[in-house]
Each structure stands twice: as C-alpha cells, then as structure tokens.
Image (spheres, rainbow, N blue to C red):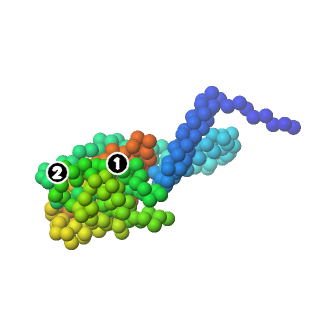
Amino acid sequence: MKVTRAPLSTSAAWRRTCLALLGALLTGDAFALMLMGLFNFGVVLPLAIGAAFLMLSWRWETVAQWRTASRRRRWIWGIGRAAFAAWLVTLGMFFYFISTGISESTDAGSPPEAILILGSGTPHCAASPTLAARLDKGLALARQWPAARVVVSGGQDFGLRCSEADVMADYLTTHGLAPDRLIREDRSTSTEENLLFSRRLLEQQGVSAGDQLVLVTSDFHLIRAKRIAHKAGFRTVSGAGAATPLYLRYNAWLREYFAFISGWILREY
C-alpha cells in the first residue's frame, strides 16, 4: 500500500523556503571567502549553520516526524531552538556594541613615539583586504608623524613560509615608507602576543611602555586590542581603526564575538 504524505501547511512551506534561502546565502558567502584564502571561525561557523539549514529544509518532513515522535524529543528540540535563539540575541547585542564602538580616527593628543600595526592574515603570502586596510591606515599616520617608529606585528600563518610582519614590511616599503623606520615583530600568534612581543622590541629601541603609542587595527578589533594593550603594559595608547570591507564585515564581527569571549576566559584583558 502506497503511503502519501500530507501537504505542508502554508506556514511550514514558508519556513522551509526561508531556511533553504538563508542556508544557501550562508554557505555561498563562506565558500566565496574560502576561495579567497580566508579560513577562520567567522567563515567556518556560517558554513556549518548554512549547511544545517539546507539539510533541515531538505529533510523537513523527516525531522518533523522525528521531533514529534515522543515528548522527550519535543523537549530536546525546544531546548535546542531556544538556545539557538538566545545565542542570536547575544550575537545581535554584540554586533550593536561593535557598531557603536567603531572609530576610524586616532585620538592621539601629541605626536606618538611609535605606531603599531597589527597583522591580519596573509593568504598566499600577500596582504588580505583587511590587512591592506590596516597598512594603508598605518602608512597615512606614518606620513603624518615622520619621527614615529613603525612596528609591524604578526607571525607565520599556518601552512605558509612567510611571516605576516615580512609581508607587512614589504607592503609599506613598496608604498614609500623608509625601511629604517620599521621594527618587525614576527613571532606572535595572537593579539596578546602582538602587544607583548612588540613592547619588548620597542623597549630595545628606547621606546618605553609609557610613551605615546598609536595602535592600528581594524575598526571592529580596536576595542579589544586597546584593552589588551593596557594589560600588556602600554599606558598611553591611542587607537586608529581601519574600515573593514563590507563583504567580510559581519564574518569578522562574528569571529570577534568569540574572540571577546575567549579573551575574557583567558584573561587577555
């Protein structure tokens, strides 16, 4: 005897369609960024969520039968959905916090002794769009304050033979910065190490932790980076935020969401 499935209600059909569209958007965005050489949690997580949405849309009837088969399964489904909704609320609050805290201008009251540019990925041993924006911001400040030392900070990305510091230095010198102004910090693997290792190199060059420092990073990263700088011992820190390209802005914010949590747990700031 052939079993026929009951047609989906209008609301269920709309939910299924929305899940499919949202899943396709998330997975498409993630794959596009991966093809550009960008692999981080802000890219992988949307890929996983998008794939889950597509699977749920495809197997809608099967999932509906599973979750309604028993009271325990309905309870598990309800808890999972509530937890995901609560996470989305906290993520939205964090995005609002980041958007209101973004600043693209430096608030240095006097010429700094040093300008510190933080690394941000070098796929194929070339500056990523995010890193290029930071370098352009730092280069403009270096021209504004010609006496300031310029620190480029970033270690070696996984699977690459180049260090971020070397790629950054090459970019800046190619665009006209004098090589003798540069200090390369090429061992760090985190923002905390960026600041700690750079402080030691600056002190070797006669720049103390109490001297005026301008910290250059992406706009979304500036709040956390300045807190870590203070924890690392820098006492007079100004921030200069580089604009994040729109097509990867929210992926970067998502990654920063988890970085804020892990930084708090690890007491980086």
The residue lying furthest to the right in this view is 1
Callout 2 crowding tier (Cα within 10 Å): few <14, some 14–19, many ≥20: some
Give the residue pinned by disc 1. 133
Residue 148 in which image quadrant:
bottom left
| Residue kind at label 1, given as amino acid type | Ala
The reply to whether dot 1 and dot 2 touch (C-beta < 8 Å) is no
For label 2, the residue is 108
Q: Is residue 109 left or right of residue 100?
A: left
Residue 219 shows in this picture:
no
Alpha carbon distance from label 1 to label 2: 20 Å
Q: Quadrant of residue 116?
A: bottom left
Q: Specify the amino acid type for callout 2.
A: Ala
- Which residue is found at the position 31% from the left and 49% from the top? 136
Secondary structure beneath dot 2 equals loop
> Whole-percent x and y of residue 238?
20, 53
Q: Nearer the viewer, residue 42 or 212?
A: 212
Q: Residue furthest bottom?
A: 204
